[in-house]
């Protein structure tokens, strides 16, 4: 499309992110009003509007704006990475707008696809639609797990295997809880949505289990006609059928091994040099250390239950517009491209998930005097567009490695459940329902890279980031000097990375005497 024409149109409506229309200048009666809701991208704007007269006459809408106010500039040079004033943006856009910027997400446009129903612009009351959203979610999950006719599980359904009929019945009961009002005449909350809100408040405000029990009992006394669970335990049981479970795996207190699979029945550490007891006391079943692991399978499958997200999981291949010499998405990286070339069967289906793993330790108590370190491990699906893949709702918490001491080089012990699941994901995959096309496929996944600081890099990779050969890039060529008085290594010789004709290469007095 005409880059200059798109730039002019962009400037004409830049000042209006929320209003339904922008009035045209009075001295140009032949120019129609610009209804923002009618346009979802620049292509539609070009087709529906051709009254562009000139740059100076189309920046009239910015006259009332503070001249120092800055917005992301969508010109080809800034590419929305730099904020500019309106005057600077005006000059930049004379060279054209970024061709791939067809959805103005940095300037107020919603994320929804342009092919959604026409009634998408109707603003629904969020509170009244929450129950409908939960019902829709449960319908999608039921269809994904048990087939299109899963609601008929009361009878023998041929589409549902015998071993899954009981699970479908449980899920059907959960759907009935979502459809049942909290009390007669209540249209705002169902029993399920009420429980979801209560548990959300507990998490956000750090309520104790005892406080939740007391609150629920009080609410039952005040509202005896309402279907309120009697305890925190009952509330958790109600949503347990959603399937997003947490596996609690016992671990050796010295981080030697997990009591998992072949070690599940042991009462002492299998390490001959450790032999630490599994439980706090011989007569109890309270473990000394517990790894909380969140299975990846159900979480990745849920990404394809929602139609919009399922479409976005293909974005990196089907809708991304590559730009030469510019990395706009991790799919432009060398690692991504080399992986696709090495595994063409994996790259053939754009729905297969590319993951990044990030971890770091922190003190959950915020008290530096209390030496406690806990390590959450988070997975990031990079199939999504860049404005979604790094948002909190799409971060997948994989496990929480417990403290109190720093995990150190024994981190690989706790990664075993995740590694086993990733192997199964890569080798065979799992049958998954794709709501965007209404069919099932074999979903595969692969871990491309890790994200961490330098100390955590040592724990993840096994490469020591201390000592004489600490650099994982230079390896044996690392130039280091041990400081006798400081009792640590100092890394020298960085002049070798300068150009051969750089003047610092000859300054022997200012630097060490190597690498002239």
Image (cartoon, rainbow, N blue to C red):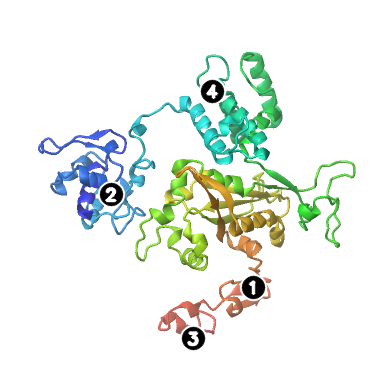
- Residue 392 visible: no
User: Going from the N terminus, do you reach mark 2 or mark 1 first?
Assistant: 2
Q: How far across and how far down the image is residue 323, in percent?
A: 35, 61
Checking the image for residue 489, the label placed there is 1
* CB atoms of marks 2 and 1 within 8 Å: no
User: Going from the N terminus, do you reach mark 4 or mark 2 first?
Assistant: 2
Q: Nearer the viewer, residue 479 or 359?
A: 359
Q: Is residue 19 above or below residue 363?
A: above
Q: How far across and how far down the image is residue 247, in percent?
A: 70, 45
Q: How many marks?
A: 4
**Within the image, what quadrant is residue 173 found in?**
top right
Disc 3 is placed on an element classified as loop
Is 433 on the left or on the right of 238, as rendered? left
Residue to which mark 4 is pinned: 189
Q: CA distance from mark 2 to mark 1?
A: 48 Å
Q: CA distance from mark 3 to mark 1?
A: 22 Å
Q: Rate crowding at label 4 as few (under 14), some (14 to 19) or many (20 or more) other CA atoms within 10 Å.
A: many
Q: Nearer the viewer's eye, disc 2 or disc 1? A: 2
Q: Rate crowding at label 1 as few (under 14), some (14 to 19) or many (20 or more) other CA atoms within 10 Å.
A: some
Disc 1 is placed on an element classified as strand
User: Going from the N terminus, do you reach mark 3 or mark 2 first?
Assistant: 2
Residue found at x 62% / y 62%: 455
Checking the image for residue 85, the label placed there is 2
Q: CA distance from mark 4 to mark 2?
A: 46 Å
Residue to which mark 3 is pinned: 516
**Within the image, what quadrant is residue 190 found in?**
top right
User: Going from the N terminus, do you reach mark 3 or mark 1 first?
Assistant: 1
Q: Nearer the viewer, residue 255 or 394?
A: 394
């Amino acid at each position: 499309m005409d880059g200059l024409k798109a730039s002019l149109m962009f400037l004409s409506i830049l000042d209006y992110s929320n209003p339904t229309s922008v009035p045209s200048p009075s001295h140009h009666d032949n120019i129609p009003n610009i209804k923002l809701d009618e346009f979802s991208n620049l292509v539609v704007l070009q087709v529906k509007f051709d009254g562009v007269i000139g740059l100076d006459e189309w920046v009239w809408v910015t006259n009332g704006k503070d001249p120092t106010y800055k917005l992301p500039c969508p010109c080809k040079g800034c590419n929305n990475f730099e904020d500019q004033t309106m005057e600077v943006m005006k000059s930049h856009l004379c060279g054209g707008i970024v061709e791939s910027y067809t959805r103005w997400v940095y300037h107020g446009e919603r994320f929804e696809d342009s092919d959604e129903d026409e009634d998408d612009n109707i603003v629904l009351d969020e509170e009244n639609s929450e129950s409908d959203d939960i019902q829709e979610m449960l319908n999608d999950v039921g269809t994904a797990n048990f087939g299109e006719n899963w609601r008929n599980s009361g009878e023998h359904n041929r589409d549902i295997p015998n071993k899954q009929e009981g699970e479908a019945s449980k899920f059907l009961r959960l759907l009935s809880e979502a459809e049942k009002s909290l009390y007669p005449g209540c249209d705002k909350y169902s029993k399920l949505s009420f429980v979801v809100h209560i548990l959300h408040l507990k998490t956000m405000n750090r309520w104790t289990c005892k406080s939740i029990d007391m609150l629920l009992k009080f609410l039952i006394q005040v509202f005896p006609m309402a279907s309120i669970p009697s305890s925190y335990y009952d509330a958790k049981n109600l949503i347990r059928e959603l399937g997003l479970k947490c596996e609690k795996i016992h671990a050796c207190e010295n981080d030697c091994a997990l009591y998992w699979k072949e070690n599940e029945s042991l009462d002492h550490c299998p390490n001959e040099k450790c032999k630490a007891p599994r439980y706090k006391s011989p007569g109890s079943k309270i473990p000394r250390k517990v790894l909380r692991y969140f299975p990846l399978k159900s979480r990745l499958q849920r990404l394809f239950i929602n139609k919009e997200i399922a479409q976005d999981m293909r974005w990196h291949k089907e809708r991304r517009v590559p730009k030469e010499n510019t990395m706009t998405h991790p799919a432009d990286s060398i690692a991504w491209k080399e992986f696709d070339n090495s595994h063409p069967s994996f790259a053939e289906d754009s729905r297969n998930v590319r993951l990044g793993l990030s971890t770091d330790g922190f003190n959950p108590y915020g008290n530096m005097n209390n030496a406690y370190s806990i390590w959450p491990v988070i997975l990031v699906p990079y199939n999504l567009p860049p404005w979604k893949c790094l948002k909190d709702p799409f971060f997948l918490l994989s496990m929480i490695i417990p403290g109190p001491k720093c995990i150190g080089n024994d981190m690989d012990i706790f990664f075993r459940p995740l590694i086993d699941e990733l192997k199964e994901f890569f080798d065979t995959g799992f049958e998954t329902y794709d709501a965007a096309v209404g069919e099932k496929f074999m979903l595969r996944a692969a871990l491309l890279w890790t994200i961490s600081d330098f100390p955590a890099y040592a724990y993840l990779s096994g490469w020591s980031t201390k000592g004489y050969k600490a650099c994982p890039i230079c390896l044996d060529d690392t130039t280091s000097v041990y400081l006798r008085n400081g009792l640590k290594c100092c890394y020298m010789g960085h002049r070798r990375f300068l150009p051969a004709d750089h003047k610092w290469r000859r300054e022997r007095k200012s630097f060490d005497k190597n690498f002239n």
